Image (cartoon, helix red, strand yellow):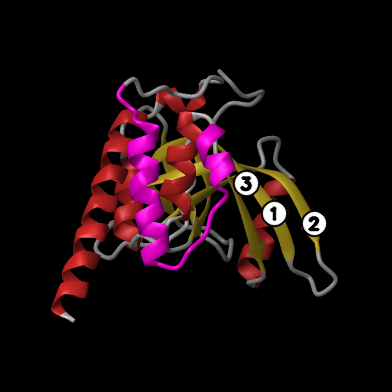
Amino acid sequence: MLRRFDLPDSLPLFPLPGAVVMPRARLPLQIYEPRYLQMIEDALKTSHRLIGMIQPQEGALEDLAQVGTAARIVSFTEVDDGRYMITLGAVSRFRLTGVRPGFTPYLIGDADWSDYPLDRGLQPETDPGFSRPGLLGKLRRFMDSHELSTDWDAAETVEDEMLVNSLSMLLPFHPEEKQALLEARNLTERRQMLDGLLDYALLSGDKEETIQ
């Protein structure tokens, strides 16, 4: 086991549309709702400091997606107005098998950890078929069409997994598309899906320009 703690059978859930945490990635968050402030305080009292990031999803169990990511609170700061500024570090994806009734103002979910053993490895995944120039070429066109900017020097040099996972988390895809990227079984599958989403977005943009 990668961590110095056992993965729990259940963990507090933080449903947030559009927010996914890919394997070995980090996510900064600002916490201000009272129930989630309580959740953070309770999580900080545990040995593992885990919370389950999961997207709301209509028609799913308790209106939540089937798969989320258990992430550890790796840093936190309490702001004068009572907010928490936290950074989460991904530990492992999990499959949500139930939501427990309880006395907390936030949801507690039962977690099955068996589907994603690669998440708990120390080494990043590799993708032998990855073409960085091809992906970055599409990314430049996508960013230009959406009037977005990025650190291109970092994009050229960062590890394959960090690049693919960061783009999967940060690009303005629909929540359903981000969920599909999250549930990809491995890095190759996620990169192929990311390629397809960029292709579709660029093709759709070209069609819109033609219609106009």
Number of disc labels: 3
Q: Which residue is disc 1 drawn over?
A: 86
The secondary structure that dominates the magenta segment is helix
Magenta residues, as a range?
129-157
Which residue corresponds to mark 3?
Answer: 88
Residue, far bottom: 212
Q: Quadrant of residue 18?
A: bottom left
CB within 8 Å, label 3 to label 2: no
Name the amino acid type tagged 2: Thr
Pointer 1 with pointer 3, Cβ within 8 A: yes
- Which residue in the structure is indicated by mark 2? 77
Q: Is residue 172 left or right of residue 104?
A: left
Q: Give whichever of discs 3 and 2 has the lower sequence position.
A: 2
Q: Say if mark 1 contacts mark 2, CB within 8 Å.
A: yes
Q: Which mark is on residue 136?
A: none
Where does the N terminus fall, quadrant-wise?
top right
